[in-house]
Image (tube, helix red, strand yellow):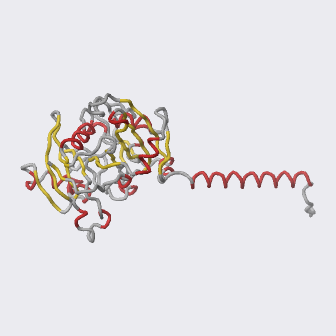
Amino acid sequence: MNHALHPAPLPARKARRRVGALSGFLAGSLFGLMAGLAPGAADAAAPQTQACPAPAATSAGSAGQHWASPAEANNDDKAPQPCASCAEPANAGAGTCAVYRFLASAACADGRCRDAQGEFVRRENGGDTFFLQHDTRFRDPIRFARARGENCRVLLWAIEPVVGIEDVPGYSGRHYWQDAYVASQRMVEPPFAKDDVAFAIQPATTRGQHQFHIHIGTLKPDYRAALAALPPDATHVRIGHYDFHARFIAVSAGANPFAGIDVLAIARSLMPRGAADLPLHGVLATVTEGGRGLWILTAPRFERSELNYVRPAECRLN
């Protein structure tokens, strides 16, 4: 039996049109929201991290857990075993372990060495031993175009085999941020101004080297202006293309502003998934208020290029 097809009653057709219009509006709104997110925010929403084997005394999922980003999710850190350090034989020959390999070589045995990446000096502070690097690639702008003009980019390198920001068990109990601040004031000439110095660590997704290191530079004008206008109870700030989670900490004037401050524990507390987000988020820490304040900012896929490494005169390690 044939059934004739009849148009739906008018109210039903109107209802369908309203539903279709609403669906289109919601889809467009969602697209607009995603398009407006900071770089890497969508990546953070779709987790790309994996839990590493935890030390026996550490429960899975705790703040002490080491998480990693798979090599295929990273720009340059292609360590074959992302959960392992550069001391692991499988990682030892990788390009992402080149600096660790050089610092552990006979060339640096006396605590002072140089290569195409720059000048390295072993230093101590409060019982900690580390290497400082003055990156001199700016002297060869044809070969290293990205470093053009960067006459004062200083880095602190862990000597022990510690992976980057995500290796919580590896850097637990160490004071690398305090060391970096002391280096900026006493081990670099000319020293960095207290209200201008900034420290950054990149996540696995954007860094070039697997070994733990902190970049030392200064704030760019847009960062300086944004933080100067930010109330101390602010928890978020947008600067450039980044939406940062933020925390302000008042510290004692005249003291090391990082003393007693676990920067990366605070950073973990700001991240949506805690330690599981460490391989995806970078951290910026900067001193303000004449040495009486400390801002800690974290954002997905943060890059060291957000700091300024240009000064009136080339700096040097002393």
Name the residue rendered at 48%, 39% in the picture.
Answer: 230
In the depicted view, which residue is nearer to us: 114 or 174? 114
Residue projecting furthest to the bottom: 142
Could you tell whether 33 is left or right of 63 in the image? right
Q: Where is residue 208 in the image (x, y as percent from the top left)?
A: 30, 56
In the image, residue 306 above or below residue 179: below
Name the residue rendered at 63%, 51% in the picture.
Answer: 30
In the image, residue 302 above or below residue 269: below
Report the quarter where the N terminus lies: bottom right
Q: Position of residue 118 (x, y in %)?
A: 19, 58
Name the residue rendered at 26%, 30% in the picture.
Answer: 255
Q: Where is residue 186 in the image (x, y as percent from the top left)?
A: 19, 41
In the depicted view, which residue is nearer to us: 131 or 14? 131
Q: Position of residue 73 (x, y in %)?
A: 40, 55
Dividing the picture into quadrants, the one containing residue 2 is bottom right
In the depicted view, which residue is nearer to us: 147 or 106? 147
Could you tell whether 62 is left or right of 6 in the image? left
